[in-house]
Amino acid sequence: MAAIKSIEELEKIREQAKDLINLRKDNETKTRVVVGMGTCGIAAGARQTMLAILDELKKRNLDNVIVTETGCIGLCKFEPLVDVIKPNQPKVTYVNVNEDKARQIVVKHIINNQIIDDWVIPNI
Amino acid sequence: MIMMKELSLHVLDIVENSINAGATLVEINIDEDTKKDVMIIEIIDNGRGMDETTLQKVKDPFFTTRTTRKVGLGLPLFEQAAKSCGGELEIYSKVGEGTRIKASFVRSHIDRPPLGNMSDTMVLLVAANPGKDFIYRHRIDGGEFVLDTREIKKTLQDVPISNPMVLDWIKAFVEENLKQISGGV
């Protein structure tokens, strides 16, 4: 059986990661993704939605995206809600975002700059 | 009816309350005792806490501090989950000190939701709140493990805890340790 993950292993990860860190700390050039994580969002599956976004970003090696969460914004029946805010562009809010939609949003919108109109609600 | 399919989702939901209350450190304690047939989930934060009046209203679904909608379902849902499994929900809070939520369950109760994916809950909390600290302690009978983000940050130094490689490590750490203390299956 493989040894249980240990803190020592983290040392190795640190060594690997520190060379790859994007040293640019200016958040203005980064895309922000905000996932609704209120009770309504969580009950609708927002945890898996956000993990899918993180996974897709990791697979594609994108480190200029900040993923955060927010509480309930009063549109509970549309949860999970995901906002994509690109630098100098208006916020785009996607509704009922499951894992599959989440991955497509990363590819089409975040990478290729194509808003998926069918899943968007008008700017609120 | 709205319900959380996993206890780990309730944990996520309650910890979100802590974060919104300005907590910088949140402790999650899960204690399972197969002989006594109990499972206890405790969430302790150092957020701003609640006064007596708020504390009395907080289990009422029609009370919320939020302004975007009129109901607050997180705690009532968690309480209902505990009560329908022969347990209860207790809340202790003090203004300026923090809040402690303790939910108990009859572990073998047929209606008890599964714990679900605690590794996902922890990864999400860390990824979305890299500036906050979390201590997750899980005990099953004699076995115990602890995930402490303060320790992880100390080891990582300048590498952010939200780094994907670190998140993968956290996920594997929780999964492997949980497997180990639940009998190595």
Image (cartoon, helix red, strand yellow):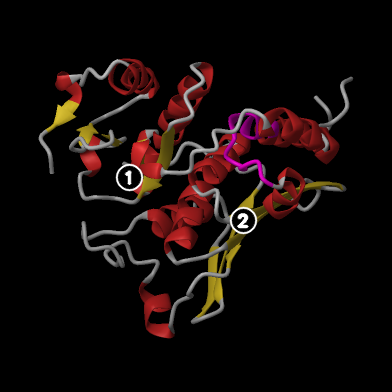
Amino acid type at mark 1:
Cys
Residue at 36%, 74% (x, y): give it.
Answer: B57
Q: Are marks 1 and 2 in contact (CB under 8 Å)?
A: no
Observer-nearest of A9 and B56: A9
A9 to B51, vertically: above or below: above
Chain letter behind tag 2: B
Q: Going by the image, does B90 lie left or right of B183?
A: left
Q: Which mark is residue B133?
A: 2
Chain letter behind tag 1: A
Q: Is residue A96 visible?
A: yes
Task: From the top left corner, tell me how far across and down residue A23 is, in percent.
Answer: 55, 38
Task: From the top left corner, tell me how far across and down residue B65 is, in percent.
Answer: 31, 67
What element does badge 2 sit on? strand
What element does badge 1 sit on? helix
Q: Is residue B167 magenta?
A: yes
Observer-nearest of A74 and A5: A5
Label 1 and label 2: CA atoms lie apart by 24 Å
Residue at 64%, 50% (x, y): give it.
Answer: B106
Task: From the top left corner, tell me how far across and down residue A10 is, in percent.
Answer: 77, 36
Residue at 36%, 21% (x, y): give it.
Answer: A106
Label 1: few (<14), some (14–19) or many (≥20) C-alpha neighbours in 10 Å: many
Task: From the top left corner, tell me how far across and down residue B89 is, in percent.
Answer: 53, 63
Q: Going by the image, does B31 lie left or right of B58?
A: right
Label 2: few (<14), some (14–19) or many (≥20) C-alpha neighbours in 10 Å: some
A3 to A72, vertically: above or below: above
Q: Is residue A33 visible?
A: no
Residue to which mark 1 is pinned = A40
Residue at 57%, 39% (x, y): give it.
Answer: B162
Q: Identify the magenta region.
A: B158-169
Observer-nearest of A90 and B95: A90
